[in-house]
Amino acid sequence: MSEQPIEVEGTITSVLPGTMFRVTIDSNQHEVLAHISGKMRKHWVRLTVGDRVRMEMSPYDLTKARITYRLK
């Protein structure tokens, strides 16, 4: 029985080494540390500051997220 991830959208505020990003969530202006998902890494999706992204967060740790999609 696995917990469902929380889906949120945000904007990348800074690019960190090791495919890590600092992202501000749109709804509550909370800042999280996010890494890029394997599928995005496989397809060479490039992310820069100011990009809007969709992320999945664990209900247990609300300081980290996984970027799953770059929004247009």
Image: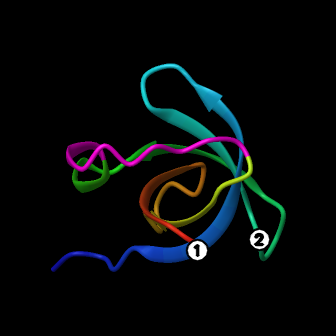
The residue singled out by tag 1 in the image is 8
Cα separation, mark 2 vs mark 1, equals 8 Å
Q: Is residue 24 above or below residue 72?
A: above
Which residue is outermost to the left?
1
User: Which of the pair 2/35 is nearer the observer?
Assistant: 35
The residue singled out by tag 2 in the image is 26
Q: Magenta region, mostly helix, strand or loop?
A: loop
- Picture coordinates of residue 46, whole percent (x, y): 46, 43
User: Which of the pair 64/46 is nearer the observer?
Assistant: 46
Task: State the residue at coordinates (15%, 80%).
Answer: 1
Query: Residue 5's quadrant in the figure?
Result: bottom left
User: Which of the pair 25/58 is nearer the observer?
Assistant: 25
Query: Residue 2's quadrant in the figure?
Result: bottom left
Q: Is residue 26 above or below residue 33?
A: below
- Image quarter (top left, top right, bottom left or bottom right) of the C terminus: bottom right
- Picture coordinates of residue 15, whole percent (x, y): 63, 31
At numbered mark 1, what does the secondary structure look like: helix, strand or loop?
Answer: strand
Q: On the picture, is 16 further left or further right than 45?
A: right
Query: Residue 68's quadrant in the figure?
Result: bottom left
Task: State the residue at coordinates (68%, 64%).
Answer: 10
- Picture coordinates of residue 50, whole percent (x, y): 74, 51
Q: Is residue 56 above or below residue 38?
A: below
Three-letter amino acid code of the residue under disc 2: Asp
Q: Is residue 16 above or below residue 55?
A: above
Which colour style is shown?
rainbow
Three-letter amino acid code of the residue under disc 1: Val
Circle 1: is it few (<14), some (14-19), or many (20+) Cα within 10 Å?
some
Look at the image and say whether residue 46 sits in the magenta stretch.
Answer: yes
Asked whether the residues under the numbered discs 2 and 1 touch, taking CB atoms below 8 Å apart as contact, a structural biologist would say: yes
Task: State the residue at coordinates (60%, 49%).
Answer: 63
- Magenta residues span 41-49
